[in-house]
Amino acid sequence: MACGRHPDQASLPPAAMERPIHIDSITVYADEAFRYIVDQEVRVYENDQPDQHLQVIYLPEAEVLRHLYTDSFSTVVIGRRLRESERIQLFKKNHITPDESCFARDGIALVAHSTFPQDTLTYTLVGQLVAGRSDRYKLVFEGNGSGVLSYMFGLFSQSSRPSAFAVKNTNELVDYLQKDTKAIGFLPYDKISDEDVSDVRDLLKKVKLLYVAKADSTGRTIVSTASQSEIADESYPFARPINFIQHSMDQKVGTGFVNFLYKERSGRIILKSGLVPAIMPSRTININTDGLK
């Protein structure tokens, strides 16, 4: 029966030979800060949709945005919404208005050596430090050209400052804080959100997670830190969106993945990682009243 067939086809059923396998694929450029959560989402999605594939390239935010401007079909993941000036520049360059989909919320965690003299910093002081109006503490950021730098300087300053340092990764940031016990480190909360990971537990033993005090609209001071609950209730002032940005939504794999990011299964992946999904998965509670009188 196998006469005349390719050797590899001899063992295949007729239906498999008649149905060619076609895999749709896109490339996604993602902020390297979100490798942990994006890898999990892509792995589950591709398992459910074996005919679709996402090749994810992780880069600093500055490099991710460069691809957004230079590649008219690029898809990116960054830790903020595009600024209006960036949207205008993108439209002028490519005559394209990008679609932005916030599928989760992260935050910028402030950490220091365990012997750091303060547990809480005021929002005003953090702003003064970032903007260069105070030199009370040295600042160290994870990643040159990273989304953490972009987010914090976007809030308080449009220019960098000589006393702010950028290191290559989280391990180097923690090592720096062990040497300079009066420095403050800034890193994505995503890097420390899942305490079920042994590396995260080891990291948290070496640093102190700082609180931030900020007055709300009524003048009441709210003290919060980078945590899932305080990012969810919006009390933490340095929370940020994780945005999936596309120029065009007509690619099957791209639209399918965006839809998946808003489904319950994706939300549970995000919750398990310690972050906050844009749409909370439902929770069903069954109450057994049998035997109650």
Image (spheres, rainbow, N blue to C red):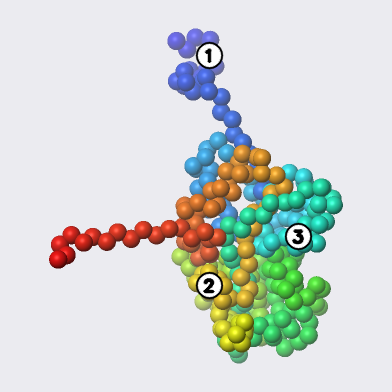
Residue 107 bears which disc, if any?
none
Please name the residue shown 49% across and 9% down the image.
3
Please name the residue that numbered disc 1 is placed on: 5
Q: Nearer the viewer, mark 3 or mark 2?
A: 2
Nearest the eye: 157 or 91:
91
| Camera-nearest label, 2 or 1 | 2
Whether residue 175 appears in this view of the structure is: no
Label 2 sits on a secondary structure element that is loop
As drawn, the label of residue 233 is 2
Image location (x, y in percent) of residue 4: 53, 10
Amino acid type at circle 3 is Ala
* Rendered image: mark on residue 62: 3
- Above or below: residue 12 compared with residue 258: above
Q: Nearer the N terminus, badge 2 or badge 1?
A: 1
SS of the residue under disc 3: helix
- Above-or-below relation of 261 to 143: above
Q: In terms of sequence position, does the residue under pointer 3 or pointer 2 come before the other? A: 3
Q: Name the residue rendered at 61%, 78% in the picture.
A: 111
Q: Earlier in the sequence, mark 3 or mark 1?
A: 1
